[in-house]
Image (cartoon, helix red, strand yellow):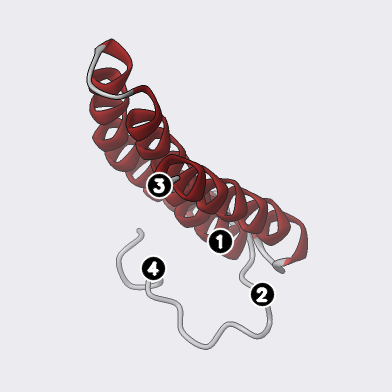
Amino acid sequence: MIAVILICIGVLFNIFGCIGLIRLPDVYNRLQSATKCVTLGCCSILLGAAFHFGIGDAFFKSLLAIPIIFFSSTVAAHALIHGAYHFGAKLDKRTVKDDYKDSVK
């Protein structure tokens, strides 16, 4: 039962991340939505798979994949956002604060 709940939560996070890709106004918000939602969704699905299959090869592979996905997706999103800002992707007009303005040269 726990595995089904975790997998359903993961699927919902992935759906919300996909909706964020469609609905949010600029590349920065879209990347934030995709990174956070899909990372949490995939980690939840992997944790659900670990509970479903029990202790064995799939359990250890799932638990190994969770930190790899967590750290690699956050670093990749930071690199993509930094690159988008460097190449001039515009912020949405409703953006209140530009944190990269002083750090990117």
Sequence-first disc among 1 and 3: 3
Sequence-first disc among 2 and 3: 3
Q: Which residue lies under the disc numbered 1?
A: 28
Sequence-first disc among 2 and 4: 2
Instruction: Please determine whether, in this image, residue 50 is positioned above or below residue 5.
Output: above
**Circle number at residue 64:** none
Q: Quadrant of the N terminus?
A: top left
Helix, strand or loop for disc 2: loop
Q: What amino acid does circle 4 point to?
A: Tyr
Q: Position of residue 7 (x, y in %)?
A: 51, 42
Instruction: Say if residue 83 shows up in the picture.
Output: no
Kindly identify the residue that appears in the image at 66 percent across and 75 percent down.
92
Kindly identify the residue that appears in the image at 46 percent across and 84 percent down.
97
Q: Nearer the viewer, mark 1 or mark 3?
A: 3
For residue 2, side relative to residue 7 (left or right): left
Q: Which residue lies under the disc numbered 4?
A: 100
For residue 20, side relative to residue 46 (left or right): right
Nearer-the-camera pick, 62 or 24: 62
Sequence-first disc among 4 and 1: 1
Q: Which residue lies under the disc numbered 3?
A: 2
Nearer-the-camera pick, 30 or 83: 30
Q: Which residue lies under the disc numbered 2?
A: 92
Q: What amino acid does circle 2 point to?
A: Asp
Q: Quadrant of the C terminus?
A: bottom left
**Quadrant of residue 55 in the image?**
top left
Nearer-the-camera pick, 34 or 99: 34
What is the CA distance from the residue labelled 4 to the residue labelled 1? 11 Å
